[in-house]
Amino acid sequence: MSSHVVVLAAGQGTRMRTTLPKVLHRLAGLALIEHVLRAASSLSPASVVVVVGHQADRVKAGLDGRADLAFAQQSDQRGTGHALMQTAPHLGNKRGTLVVLSGDVPLIRADTLQRLVATHESAGAAMTVVTATVDRPYGYGRIVRTEGALARVVEERDASDEQRRIKEINSGIYAFDLEPLFDALETIPTAGSVNEIYLPGLVTRYRREGRAVETISVDDPNEVRGINSQTELAEVKRIVRQSKNEELMAEGVTIEDPATTYIDADVTVGADTVVHPGVILEGRTHIGARCELHAGVRIVDSTLGDDVLVRNHCVIERASVGSQSRVGPFAHLRPDTEVGRDARIGNFVETKKTTLGDGSKASHLTYLGDATIGTGVNVGAGTITCNYDGTHKHPTTIGDRVFIGSGTELVAPVTLGDDAYVGAGSTITEDVPTGALGVARGRQVNKEGWVASRGSSGRRDD
Ligand code: UD1
Ligand code: CA
């Protein structure tokens, strides 16, 4: 049977108290709704419709590049049932199974969705609800059963004291038979002071009609945790972080202090790599085997080869570092930096849009921007590429085996040929040919006896 998916994401998320729409809040490097869409994709659905409403354009922009999605607009947020009604133009004439997911329930697993669809279809149910038994049911709709069967869902605000003690909750995730669905939605009575249409109201409706309503429950209640507030978001982040760390440790990564290690969902780390406290690995970052990442390192969307050492407090963004190289402490590799193999980037070095070839070194206090640097180059302490003239950025090209003396300024555009030397303290404004020595600095003048001739009044005592 073909399946379809709807993700409800039109709500305002008032309880988050942010201008950012709730479903765009980030969890392990992905928006909440992207976690939901990933789980949904495991069903290979025939269509996926996202219901947007509050800040619809912003939510759509956040999902830009997902050409497989259709959007339905819910102009007034009148509840989850009303939200689903807005998908009728997309799904009203479709048949088969519809899986409805909440944009704010991000940890739902692919295998649970598969089990949901399988149970629903083999029971020939009109509706199947995913439930969980939780210690703190506050805020969730409670599952009210009679003779073991689901009778109805009672929302927190409508529940009696006795019902509030029920620990089995509605996850907000359902499977529906599409055939009766849209007609039935029209008949759910409105609820609350704002005339909302609650999707769980369908349970009551279907039971009255004698249609089969099933449930499946998940063992790990974290899987269906809904995020309504900042506190709940932080709790879910902690859960996700812990499971990512555990997954990496199971693959042979040493994590010195999991409580302070923040690794996004899509990051990969090779075996025998050691991660010290306070390391943050974000986005599409890939770390090789046997690397060592010292405390306070932050790496974003970057790739490190094997056996790379990154010393304390480096920031590496959209860059790559070849195997056996060493970086830091206190280095900043900015976007489009490519460091070769067995290279060194040392203390207080900043790079941007720069290639540093295999075996090359920039060990101290240097800025390299818009530079292409060959292999076996030594960039002396305090070297600066002057790449910006106030209007344009200009390139610096440095051949292989070049030696640049300390305190050099390379005024771009400029090229240093292979095997060239630059004398310390030079301000290089012209190309230096292959094998040549370039020196560009004032000649030293020593004035004999000058200090004594100033007399004692001019002496500094300190
Ligand atoms: C809902 C369920 C509750 C369940 C809980 C699980 C209802 C009435 N209640 O409550 O039984 O235990 O989820 O997390 O369904 N949305 C819209 N349009 C709207 C309202 C909401 O698209 O008009 C979307 C929201 O963006 C969100 C999802 O539906 O992604 C759930 O809405 P929310 O207001 O968070 O429902 P809960 O109060 O958590
Ligand atoms: Ca919710």
Image: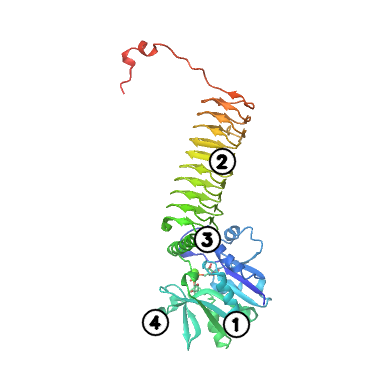
How far apart are labels 2 and 4 at the CA level?
63 Å
**Mark 1 residue crowding within 10 angstroms, few (<14) / some (14–19) / many (20+):** many
The answer to whether residue 401 is above or below residue 41 is above
Q: Measuring 45% from the left and 48% from the top, which residue is drawn there? A: 294
Front: mark 4 or 1: 1
Q: Secondary structure at mark 2?
A: strand
Return the residue nearer the eye: 350 or 390: 350
Q: Amino acid at mark 1?
A: Ala
**N-terminal-most mark, 3 or 4:** 3
Q: Amino acid at mark 4?
A: Glu
- Mark 4 sits on what residue? 162
**Mark 3 residue crowding within 10 angstroms, few (<14) / some (14–19) / many (20+):** many
- Mark 3 sits on what residue? 21
**Mark 2 residue crowding within 10 angstroms, few (<14) / some (14–19) / many (20+):** many
Q: Secondary structure at mark 4?
A: helix
**N-terminal-most mark, 1 or 3:** 3
The spot of residue 83 in percent (x, y) is 57, 71
Q: Measuring 46% from the left and 72% from the top, which residue is drawn there? A: 221
How far apart are labels 1 and 2 at the CA level?
58 Å
**N-terminal-most mark, 3 or 2:** 3
**N-terminal-most mark, 2 or 4:** 4
User: Which label sits on residue 352?
Assistant: 2
